[in-house]
Image (spheres, rainbow, N blue to C red):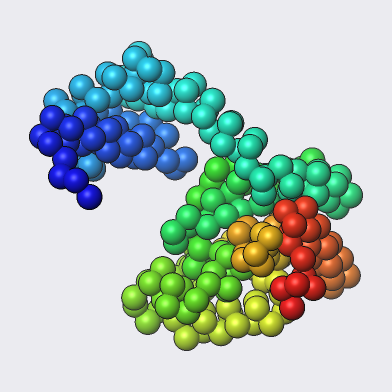
Amino acid sequence: MPKMSSGEATPVRSAERMLNILGWFKLERPRGRISEIAEDLGLAPSTVRRLVTTLEQYRFLEREPASGEYRLHIEVVRLAGIAVSTNDMHQAAAPVLDKLAKELDETLILAVLDGPQVVHLAVRLSLHRLSITPPTARRVTAYEGGANGRVLLAWLPPDEVDALIPPARSWRTQTADHEITRKHFFELLETTRTSGHSINDGVSDPDLWAVAAPVRDHTGKVQAALSLLARRSSMTDERAETFIARVLEGADAISRSVLYDKRSAD
């Protein structure tokens, strides 16, 4: 690779820092001041101010006059809309999500893996009053008990999973009542591969029941997870069996839409 000149390096470094600034904003931290961003990223406030001013000029960031905080602006939304609407998996899943949401009246999620985190690519919310309502683009940790996370990790090579989960022997889930050990977690992934789906029965939330199944691409690789979320207090054995069957059918339908052929994979 040819060595980059100092004149070329400066724009590249600025671009990297701009991307880091945009990446600083998260669903749980949607706003921030220049001083906060600079401290978290280890940059000088003057540098962050200069880059934020450029991002504001091109409508990637917007300053709220009352608080002085910055947030993502319309250009990010526009690009995100293009990325999502042209994503093959998202397009293939849309009619399946719509159909299942209408028939079952429970929340449906299409999720993908980004490092150790699960990202909600598409969400269909239930209309009934007691439904679970996670937002689109939400990120949750893949190993903290969620059904989507186990499905997205279950078919990865063991060494990749090992690198993604905590190095400690055990860790807490999102609820204080549950603790997962590394050994037990790998056993859960084996169970997921054997059954073809994963259940979250109150692990990440005391009143959450969820089932997830793998969505495969044309090569047979698991690229996404389809899940259904319901109130645990409303579950019966019959409802659970119905939801598991329909989610498996839905995941298979999405997989076929992106040209996955189970016969050739077998």
Is residue 92 visible to us here?
yes
At horizontal 84% and vertical 70% (from top left) the residue drawn is 241
In the rendered view of the protein, which quadrant contains the C terminus? bottom right
In the rendered image, the residue lying farthest to the left is: 6
At horizontal 70% and vertical 65% (from top left) the residue drawn is 213
In the figure, is residue 234 to the left or right of 19? right
Locate residue 190, reporting x and y percent: 60, 82
| 103 shown above or below 16 | below
Q: Nearer the viewer, residue 170 or 98?
A: 98
At horizontal 53% and vertical 72% (from top left) the residue drawn is 156
Number of on-image labels: 0
Q: Which image quarter: residue 252? A: bottom right
In the figure, is residue 171 to the left or right of 88? left
Q: Nearer the viewer, residue 195 or 93?
A: 93
Locate residue 200, reporting x and y percent: 65, 68
Q: Nearer the viewer, residue 189 or 9?
A: 9
Locate residue 122, reporting x and y percent: 65, 44
At horizontal 27% and vertical 18% (from top left) the residue drawn is 53
| 204 shown above or below 48 | below
Q: Which image quarter: residue 64? A: top left
Is residue 250 visible to us here?
no
In the figure, is residue 25 to the left or right of 186? left
Locate residue 51, reporting x and y percent: 24, 25
Q: Which image quarter: residue 10? A: top left
